[in-house]
Amino acid sequence: MDLSAAKRDLPKEPEQHAQLLDLVQAEIDALVNANAPITVAEATRADAEKAFGDPITPLYDGGKPPKNSKPDDMVRVASLAGFAVDATALPVASSASGPIQLVGRTSDNPKKKPETMVLLAGKKKQLSLKFATDASEAAAAAPTGDMTQAASASQQAHRALSLTPLVAAQPKVTQKSEAETENEEEMVVDPWAVEGKIDYSKLVEKFGSQLLTPSLLERLGALAAKNGMRLHRFFRRGIFFSHRDLAKILDAAENRKGLYLYTGRGPSSAAMHLGHLVPFLMTQWLQKALNVPLVVQMTDDEKFLWKGEYDEKKGEYDLDRFRALTRENAKDIIACGFDVDKTFIFSDCDYMGHMYPNVCRIWKSITYSTARAAFGFEGSSNVGQSAFPAIQAAPSFPSSFRIPLSKCGPRPDDACCLIPCAIDQDPYFRVTRDVAHKIAPKSHPLRGKPALVHSKFFPPLQGALGKMSASNTDSAVFLTDSDDEIRRKIMTHAFSGGRETAKLQRELGADLDIDVSYQWLRFFLEDDDELEKIGKSYGSGSGEFWNTAAVKERLVVELQKLVRAHKARRDVLTDSDVDAWMAVRALGAPY
């Protein structure tokens, strides 16, 4: 399979090739397990190319049609779940039944290349795959759909694949420069600190999570489509990029089993910023797309344990300050558009009695040495900090919500939990997953383990290092900022990937990876076509958005619209509304 014309780069390191082939095998296994149907379509080559558009190039060797091919030649295309091949002269099975196994990954003859391999030589890029299967073949399978149908699923998965890393990067075993070593040491990612230049591939490797695959995104998109929605832009653009056990969550949703969402907020400031908004936008979409209940933990206790102070004059701690911030932040969360009948927002300080039995079980299950290794506790950590991970873990178990989740399936304690969060929160739930079998009943589909989908960090205005901070007001746009404040912050502080002079910008274009305005548009601009237009124009230094000022102006308009709409929803909320959302009550059943 000649991939010289492919837009995606194959991994260059030999040790990554095995990982790529493992991912290919995993995708094949998923299709076989689903017994995915194969659509066979016949049309003229011209009509096939019209239906498939650009993604048809992988059908051709080297990205070009066969020699002597004519536009009115009839071709047969076989397509399933994002894969499409020119099957004009090939036998086609009726479905992806199996097993189908990659073979020939090693060769007994050292002088002979393996039959299944990745080959990179100069400009040549080839992927050679040899399969063995017991599936019966249909020598002349009849067409089962038209070319537009065959192209649709393939194009959707090609778009998803173009935004999903092929493999998690493996570190090179080479001598690093002093600057590279210093930069590596600067990357810090834990539940309380994110610093330095973030290498997400290394985080996935370090944390042991998995990259989202096109087949998982396709299944999630299909569930969303049943509720009249399309796959969220965060998934389409690889902003949510990693997961734990998402496939089992999709199994539960597809079979209408007990399922709920869990997210949270640590109230440290009166106003939330756009970085805080990202997981709530994702969670709101998931609630609507899957039609399931949600619990939102407000960790006023956590913020007090880390940031609380003792007032010598008053003779008391400032715990009540964080409890008041909880209610203010709850209004920001409600304004994101959640379903009040299926959403329970709770303060740890107020709801702890309900969760305390599970908190005790989790405390009993985790040794202090495990907690210290996972969270970096030191001798100076107060005992509350050391104990807090169990409190954040408790909502992962439906038995912590005997009343709110009482309608979550015939056996509420067996309900699966999905947690959308930034990847810095993963350590909490790795430890939770390790002890989950001791907390949940044996009948639980995941033995109690919560599933997660991880997002990348929303970059601060000053540049794509780490994440923004509520303590630095010029590093973020807040949901209370005025139109003028938004404009000032973007125009003054948004780090630019543009060149030093107009001449260089016209010649080289901008570096989109470090340009904050473009990166923020990836988060908040819904229109894929417009984003692509901006990226091409700015990245090439030509067209309407050739310079930084034009891109910043487009971002300002988008953010002003977003913040104004959020303010309008928040301003009408009363304390009575907050009381209603935080009342302990039975939530609506899923689906």
Image: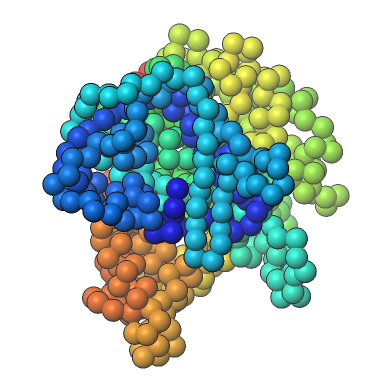
Q: In this picture, is 91 found above or below 118?
A: above
Instruction: Give residue 435's quadrant in the image.
Output: top right
Residue located 30% across and 62% down the image: 532
Look at the picture and state if 54 lies above or below 414: below
Q: Which residue does the image show at 80% across and 37% down from the upper left?
A: 370
Residue 71's spot in the image, x, y percent? Answer: 16, 50
Instruction: Please tell me which residue lies in front, 21 or 370.
Output: 21
Residue found 64% across the figure and 12% down from its top: 442
Residue 260 at x, y percent in the picture: 46, 26
Residue 390 in the figure: left or right of residue 466: right
**Residue located at (56% from left, 17% from top):** 445
Q: Is residue 46 left or right of residue 385?
A: left
Viewer-side residue, 42 vs 468? 42
Q: Position of residue 146 (x, y in %)?
A: 18, 33
Q: Is residue 245 above or below residue 358?
A: below
Q: Is residue 557 visible?
A: yes
